[in-house]
Image: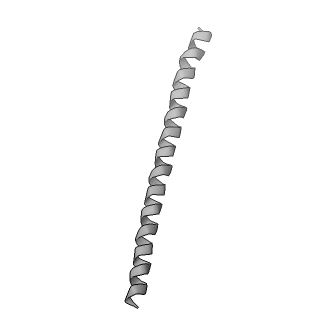
Amino acid sequence: MSSSSQQRHRHGVTKNLVEGIGGVLVGAALVLLMRGIVKRRAAEKPAADRKNP
């Protein structure tokens, strides 16, 4: 029975690592997406100001 519990524990650790890595990747993707949106808005704002004096 001890080998079964060790295998289950090892699987739990692997699952936690995979979920953690996935969370980091999703978080990084959200940061990059938000940064792109902010940069696009900042680039559009001066152009709009120049068109309407």
Residue furthest toward the bottom? 1
Residue 24 position in % (x across, y down): 44, 52
Q: For the point 40% across and 70% down, which residue is it?
A: 13
Residue furthest toward the top? 53
Quick check: 12 left or right of 36? left
Name the quadrant containing residue 20.
bottom left
Residue 31 position in % (x across, y down): 47, 42
Residue 12 position in % (x across, y down): 43, 73
* Vertical arrangement, residue 32 with respect to residue 20, above or below: above
Q: Is residue 40 visible?
A: yes
Look at the image and name its color scheme.
one colour
Residue 21 position in % (x across, y down): 44, 56
Residue furthest toward the right? 51
Quick check: 40 left or right of 19? right
- State the quadrant of the C terminus: top right
* Vertical arrangement, residue 46 with respect to residue 39, above or below: above
* Vertical arrangement, residue 1 with respect to residue 8, above or below: below
Q: For the point 40% across and 77% down, which residue is it?
A: 9
Q: Nearer the viewer, residue 9 or 50?
A: 9
Q: Is residue 52 visible?
A: no
Q: Nearer the viewer, residue 41 or 7?
A: 7
What number of labels is visible?
A: 0
- State the quadrant of the N terminus: bottom left
Q: For the point 48% across and 56% down, which residue is it?
A: 22
Q: Nearer the viewer, residue 36 or 10?
A: 10
